[in-house]
Amino acid sequence: MVFWQSSSEMSENERIRIEIAFDGPQVLSVLVPQPTADALERALGSGQESSYSFEADDGSYTVAVRRVVYVKRFARESRVGFGAVA
């Protein structure tokens, strides 16, 4: 049986994958907590030319907000199988 959670029910400890694309060919793909992804979106929407620092599963990052072209949030991974709980 598979159980689904809406995004509003996601725990703050659950990790989601985001891709941050910069002007130029660089794309950063990281796993971050839901609140970190939300805070990054707020920083991008602020219109300020600042930097944003955050912790991901593989280390610490600081990005120049003005250099970000887009941020992609991946849909939660579905888990298939007996007794799988998402």
Image: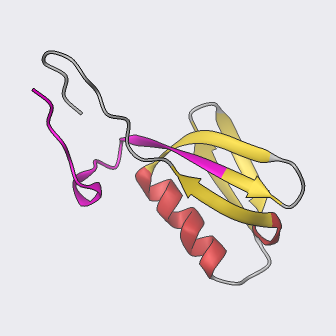
Q: Would you say 21 lies left or right of 24 here?
A: left
Q: Would you say 84 lies left or right of 38 here?
A: left
Q: What is the residue that sits farthest to the front in this orientation?
A: 80
Name the spot of residue 1 as percent of width and height, x first: 9, 26
Count of numbered badges drawn on the protein: 0
Q: For the C terminus, give its image quadrant.
A: top left
Q: What is the residue that sits farthest to the right in this orientation?
A: 24
Name the spot of residue 59 as percent of width and height, x first: 67, 35
Please check the rendered image and state whether residue 77 is part of the magenta-colored stretch, yes or no.
Answer: no
Q: Which residues are magenta?
A: 1-19
Name the spot of residue 64 as percent of width and height, x first: 80, 63
Q: What is the residue that sits farthest to the top in this orientation?
A: 82
Foreground residue, 74 or 51? 74
Q: Would you say 24 lies left or right of 40 here?
A: right
The residue located at (87%, 49%) in the rendering is 25
> Where 81 sits versus 29, above or below?
above
| Quarter of the view holding residue 4 | top left
The residue located at (76%, 46%) in the rendering is 27
| Quarter of the view holding residue 43 | bottom right
> Where 8 sits versus 59, above or below?
below
Q: Would you say 58 lies left or right of 36 here?
A: right
Q: What is the residue that sits farthest to the left in this orientation?
A: 1
The residue located at (21%, 17%) in the rendering is 81
| Quarter of the view holding residue 66 | bottom right
Please check the rendered image and state whether residue 14 is part of the magenta-colored stretch, yes or no.
Answer: yes
Name the spot of residue 41 as percent of width and height, x first: 56, 68
The residue located at (14%, 15%) in the rendering is 82
Foreground residue, 28 or 65? 28
